[in-house]
Each structure stands twice: as structure tokens, then as C-alpha cells.
Amino acid sequence: MLIDNHNRKINYLRLAVTDRCNLRCNYCMPSEGIDFVKNDKLLTIDELIRISEIVVGQGIDKIRITGGEPFVRKDLMVLLRALAKMPDLKDISVTTNATLIGPYIDELKQLGIKNINVSLDSINRETFERITRRKQFDTVHNNLIRLITEGFNVRINFIVLEGQNEQDMIPILDVMKHHNVSIRFLEEMPFNGGSKNFSGIKWHHKAILEHITQTFTEYIKLESPETSTSVNYKIKGHTGTFGIIPSFSRTFCGSCNRLRITATGDVITCLYGKPKINLRDIVRESNAKVDVENALLKVIGSRAKTGFEAQKEHSTTVFDNSMTSIGG
Ligand code: SAM
Ligand code: SF4
């Protein structure tokens, strides 16, 4: 079992499988993209499987596949098939922009992978295209509806962006009123190539809740698991729920159970801090199992207590990299 130096149990891995993406969401990447890493620097699918096996052996029982866009990676299903066979892995989930998932929906269902987070920041075509800088609205819409109707546990991630999609917060709740989905409103983090500083955002978690509850006055706060990053609510008459994730304000660090591994093998013990070690060379060595286990034990044994503490590891900008390298 992985326990950090603040006595937090680490059982959740966010595993990025690529830094590439077919969209260019303006809060995530500059329009020209970033310097994507060369293929030989990425962990191979076999290495991703090997690392997953090792961490599951150490007590990780939930893995979320993220990126970049995971489905850009043609061999993604090989990894998912392998994960689905790991008996100690209780929860496999995927975070996706839902542009490329269509052909894989049937197999995901067969594999029992039901938890899909879809990033969707607008239900208006123009706003969607302005934010993502690509014309994929219909594909995303169709795939989202298919995922919902086929019974997946769908959560929609909606980042509230000042001057861009504020006007869609209420409509998305209305449109999804009769669907069993959870819509999670996220605070924006300054991960877009460094053009924003960390001094403040208009749409912090309190402002988002106030805005929503001015329209939907009858709602209740739901009980959430201790490790949940979202505070969740149910509006009277709505089938699904909504949640608010204070990704910028970081009120959830006390119960953080997460570990992140990037597509190049960097281990990140706090989203706001710097990578602590790289596993790529270690997993390529003959003594991989023991060495990966020891490397993880070491970095988990010296985790920052909060995101604010971890943030001090950066000398200038907090996030000099795109979220696409880290996976959210
Ligand atoms: N491409 C996939 C997607 O968009 O769902 C997975 C990778 S994406 C980097 C993972 C999550 O990070 C998404 O939910 C996205 O909305 C979130 N994200 C990206 N940039 C962000 C930012 N600046 N602030 C907050 N969340 C961000
Ligand atoms: Fe791509 Fe996801 Fe980043 Fe959008 S948020 S550019 S879909 S990685």
C-alpha cells in the first residue's frame, strides 16, 4: 500500500498515454500546439502495462487514462484490454474530448469500462469551435449522446472561462436535465502556455455555485466520498447531478489520493508541483519491478502537503507547461 508522508493513502493513478491532441482548447494549448515529444520518448504500450501492473501491485485500485487525447493513440485499446484483466484494479476510467471514441464504444462496454469523463465546455457550436479551435461539434455531440444512452457513467467536465462560455452554464444544465449525467464545473487553471498569472479568476467555485443557484433555487448538497475533488449537488427535478471542482482554489488537498504519471514517464505527486522522477529508463531496465516500486515509495514519502506548498517548486510561472503533458 502506498501511504504518503502526510498519512494519505494513494490508490488512484492518473496515467497520461500521449501529449498529442486533435483539438486545441484555448485554455489548454496555444493554437500552434506545443513541442510534442518524440515518439521514442513516450512510454510504449508494453511499458504502460508494466507500470500499471507494478502500481496495482502496490495498492493502486483506480486508474484514469488521460492525455493529450487518449484516443489519438492507435494502440490505446491494447492497454485498456490489459487493464481490464487486472483483478485488483477496481476502477478504470477515461477522460476524453469524445471526438475519436466512437469506434471504440462497443468494446469499452464489453471490457466493462463504464466511467467516461467527456470534456465539453459549450453546447453552442460557435462557442465550442472558438474554444477548441476545431470543427468537431457534431461528432462530440453524437458520441456524448451515444455514451449516455448506452449506459456509461458519463461526467461532463466544463471549465468556466471568463468571457467565453459563462452563458452556457445554465443551458447545459437544462439540456441535460433528463439525462443521468454529472456535469462538473471546473475553475480554470493557468495552463495555457503561461499567458495568465495565478493572481485570481472571476469564476471561482463560490461564484459558480452562486450563479447556478440563482436560477435553480431548489437544490441539495450531496454526500461525496472523502477523496472527491468535486462538491456535488442535485437540482430538484433533474435526473443527474452537478459538481464544482475548485481546481484553482484547491480546497481538496487534505484528502488527496492521487498520483500522476505522464506519457513520458514523469511521476508527478502533486499537480501544482514539478515532476519528481522519471520511470522510462527505470522500467526499461532488467530490475524494473523493484526499482519502479522503490522510486515510487521514495517520491510518495516526500509529497508536498498542499498544492500551495508544491507550487513553490516553480521559480517563476506556476505552470510553464500545457495540461496536455500532464493529463489534468
Ligand atoms: N483530451 C482529454 C480531454 O480533454 O478530456 C484529456 C486530457 S485533458 C488535458 C484533461 C482535463 O484537463 C480535461 O477535463 C480538461 O478540461 C482539463 N484541463 C485542461 N486545461 C485546463 C485548465 N487550464 N484548467 C482546468 N482544467 C483544464
Ligand atoms: Fe486536447 Fe483535452 Fe487539451 Fe482540449 S483539453 S486541447 S481536448 S488535451
Image: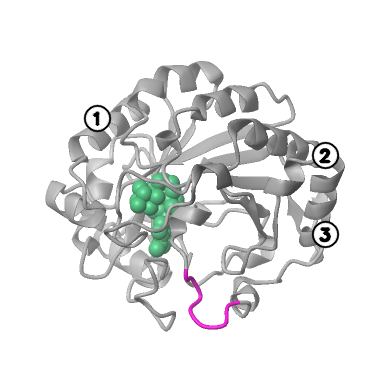
Q: Residue at x 71, y 39 (%)?
A: 51
Q: Which mark is residue 289?
A: 2
Number of numbered discs visible in the structure rendering: 3
Near mark 1 (Cα within 10 A), the count class, few <14, some 14-19 or many ≥20, is few
Determine whether the residue tagged by mark 1 lies in a helix, strand or loop: helix
Q: Residue at x 23, y 56 (%)?
A: 131
| Mark pair 3, 2: CA separation | 14 Å
Tell me which numbered mark, 1 or 2, is placed earlier along the sequence. Answer: 1
Against 153, is 26 above or below? Answer: below
**Residue designated by label 1:** 142
Locate residue 104: give its quadrant: top left
Q: Which residues are magenta?
A: 314-320
Residue found farthest to the left:
126
Against 310, is 44 above or below? Answer: above
Query: What's under tag 1, amino acid-wise?
Result: Asn
- Is residue 207 shown left or right of residue 224? left
Query: What's under tag 2, amino acid-wise?
Result: Lys
Determine whether the residue tagged by mark 3 lies in a helix, strand or loop: helix
Q: Which mark is residue 298?
A: 3
Percent position of residue 285, x then y: 79, 41
Q: Which mark is residue 179?
A: none
- The one nearer the camera, 104 or 233, is 104
| Mark pair 1, 3: CA separation | 45 Å
- The one nearer the camera, 169 or 9, is 9
> For residue 87: magenta?
no
Mark 1 and mark 2 in contact? Answer it, CB < 8 Å: no
